[in-house]
Amino acid sequence: MLQHAALLLLISSGLSVSFGLMGFVNLAHGALYMLGAYIGIAVAAKAGFWAALLIAPLVVGALGAALYLGLLCRLRGPMPQVLASFGLVFITVELVRILWGDVALTLERPAILAGSRHVLGVDYPAYRLFIILLGLAVAVGLWRTVHRSSLGAMLRAAVENPAMARAIGIRTGSLFLATFALGAALAGLGGVVAAPILSANTGMAISALIPALIVTVIGGMGSVSGTILGALIVAAIEVFGAALWPDASAVLIYAALAAALIWRPQGLLAVKGHG
Amino acid sequence: MTLEIHDLTAFHGKVQALHGLSLRVESAQIHALLGRNGAGKSALLSRIIGCLPDAQGRIIWDGQDITHWPTPRIARAGIALVPEAREVFASLTVHENLALAGRIGRGDWTVSRVGALFPNLLTRLEAPAGMLSGGEQQMLAIGRALMTSPRLLLLDEPTEGLAAPMVTALQSALASLKADGLAILLVEQNVRFAAALADRITLVSRGAAIWAGGPKEFAHADEARQRYLGA
């Protein structure tokens, strides 16, 4: 369950940056995650897993930046963002079909992370342990960046009042571009990390998007700690739901989403000013 | 340093807010802009800081034509705005509001120097700015502008909604900023406050300057006052 939560956290953290912090309704996030997996597999075939882990997020981040500059930054308001970013999902899925074919691809986990490790008296698969640690590291790094660095303060100011932020010298255009690229890179990182356990396929653009959206909405827009909590809740519901009540497991997270929206529509740990 | 504005026009959406306004602000001078609501005073400040694009005319600051510069570049050139609605970053702490603006400052203004000017803020440094009272938010908005090390301060109705002791405190703060050599362009509805501080006064009506002079001339310009301020 923890590794599932950590994987969800990796995917959702990127969405929490672009959708949560910037308020950009980015339905292409799952597509960027999928690209991360495919590009990761391609790089790993030539240069190994560790190079893929580094290069795929960079490439996906650069693609995200290009998309933002070329198309997405011109869109104002949620509806155009939904339509354009959802259109990008179809385009990306088709491109992946053309480039890699419609078969599921797998990525070999690196030798050092094969097998299992003895932790707290139990044997735990090493790769899952790696995912949990990486998820934690990303969450802590992101939390510190958003809440404890001047970059995070700049971003929060620019989201709250872009015109005033510009009037104190913040170049909001480049700031939003960098933020969107960071969100895309985190999606790409999630994709590479997921590839050895889930295998890359074209369905993952949508199948990853929905739980990530639910995590972001349940946790609270733009709240990093909310995203961590949301990932734990959604993972617990999925894992325990599948074990205890398999017939209903597919609807349980939607029921949780509905309950969360009724109980706390602003999210469990919402950031002030995001309503 | 001098701000010179020549024949400036500007639009708020489709409505023309400025109709060929000209004006000059010098260092160590408080220049008050007076006029009725909707006369174009706030539009002029927005235009100077670069928030109303598509302008005609010219804005010259320190010898450079900044008419079409993007806002962050204008801010970095030493022009700071204190907007009418204060617009402090409500979700950031008081300290974050100040420190963020200080990034482009030259370090001559620090959080403690702002605190010396507005002692109320010092006790609230870790509070979210949205929790401050109206008067404290006004102090923070001015402090934030100062943190950018401005040479020209654009103040939009700073006394609005302030209690009398706060107005007095603000008056002495502005006088000491002027003594430091800052140029201040002050938009006010509070004519008495503005006239007491100003070295130069311009009356604005329908987006153009229609009277200009010193405070002594202003005191005797009964007709202009009557006609454009109703006072």
Image: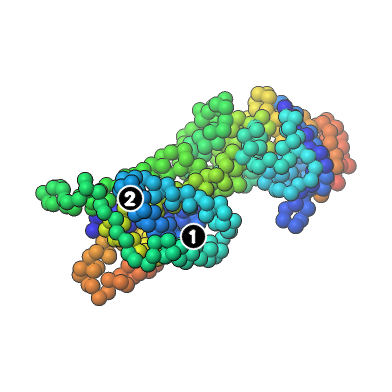
Distance CA(mark 2)–CA(mark 1):
31 Å
For residue A44, the mark is: 2
Which percent across, then down, holds residue A78? 53, 62
Q: Taking A174 as reference, is B213 above or below it?
A: above
Q: Is residue A25 left or right of residue B203?
A: left
Residue furthest left in the image: A121
Q: Which residue is mark 1?
A: A25
Q: Secondary structure at mark 2?
A: helix
Residue A38 position within the rendered picture, expressed as x and y whole percent measured from the top left: 37, 57
Residue A25 visible to the viewer: yes
For mark 2, does the 10 Å Cα neighbourhood hold few (<14), some (14 to 19), or many (20 or more) residues? Answer: many
Apparent side of residue B97 relative to residue B24 in the rendered image (left or right): left
Location of residue A114 in the rendering, given as x and y in whole percent from the top left corner: 20, 50
Q: Residue sitting at 46 percent across and 43 percent down?
A: A152
Image: B95 above or below B175:
below
Q: Say which of A124 and B16 sits in front.
A: A124
**What type is the residue that disc 1 sits on?**
Val
Which image quadrant is residue B71 in? top right
Tell me what residue is drawn at x 49 percent, y 46 percent. A178
